[in-house]
Amino acid sequence: LGHPDPRLNQVGKQDFRITRMLASFTKKDPPPHRVKPVPIAVLRNVSATAAASHCPIQQATADMIILAFFFLLRPGEYTAKAATEDAHPFLLENVQLFIGPTHRIDLFNATPAQLQQATFATLTFANQKNGVKD
């Protein structure tokens, strides 16, 4: 208050050094790559196909797809186009299921009865949004 704006030069325009600095920031930090989310019709088709197959593995896979879609709430980020390491944002080893607050289920050796008793789920992200591994 009462002092001239330090961003402006004598003529009242933004100082060229600030303009160049902001332009440099834009070049070094491009906007994020935007992707479209998966249409809900895809999830309905996955569910219908699995139900019609009468195959427990396909039904479990459909359940995990739907769980991932709604549990993560970021469907557009999990539909990678390229076959890169980032095409798999999480693996089964990143998922944990619990019966009650403390009994962790071993997903690789769990019985169907144990899986049905699960009351709590967690997901550990191995990669951060900036691509750095935890």
Image: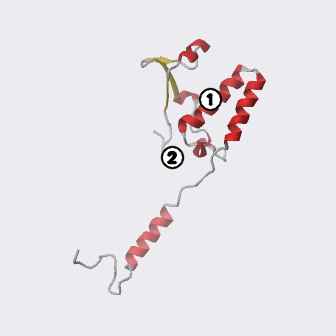
Give the vertical position of 65 relative to 6 (above or below).
Answer: above
Tell me the residue that label 1 is attached to: 64
Distance between mark 2 and mark 1 Cα atoms: 24 Å
Residue at 42% across / 18% down in the picture?
102
Q: Residue furthest right?
A: 52
- Determine the image quadrant of residue 75: top right
Q: How is the image coloured?
A: secondary structure
Compared across the picture, whether 23 is left or right of 49 comes to left
Q: Earlier in the sequence, mark 2 or mark 1?
A: 1
Residue at 38% across / 82% down in the picture?
13
Q: Which label lies toward us, 2 or 1? A: 1
Residue at 67% across / 47% down in the picture?
81
Q: Residues within 10 Å of mark 1 (few under 14, many from 20)?
A: few
- Determine the image quadrant of residue 116: top right
Give the vertical position of 8 relative to 129 (above or below).
Answer: below
- Element type at mark 1: helix
Give the vertical position of 80 relative to 126 (above or below).
Answer: below
The image position of residue 124, as x and y in percent, is: 49, 33
Q: Which amino acid, by three-letter code, is at mark 2?
A: Gly
- Determine the image quadrant of residue 22: bottom left
Compared across the picture, whether 39 is left or right of 129 comes to right
The image position of residue 118, as x and y in percent, is: 52, 19
Q: Residues within 10 Å of mark 2 (few under 14, many from 20)?
A: few
Image quadrant where one finds the C terminus? top left
The image position of residue 17, as x and y in percent, is: 38, 76
Q: Which amino acid, by three-letter code, is at mark 1?
A: Met
- Element type at mark 2: loop
Residues under numbered marks 2 and 1 in contact, where contact means CB atoms less than 8 Å apart: no
Image quadrant where one finds the N terminus? bottom left
- The label on residue 131 is 2
Compared across the picture, whether 105 is left or right of 21 comes to right
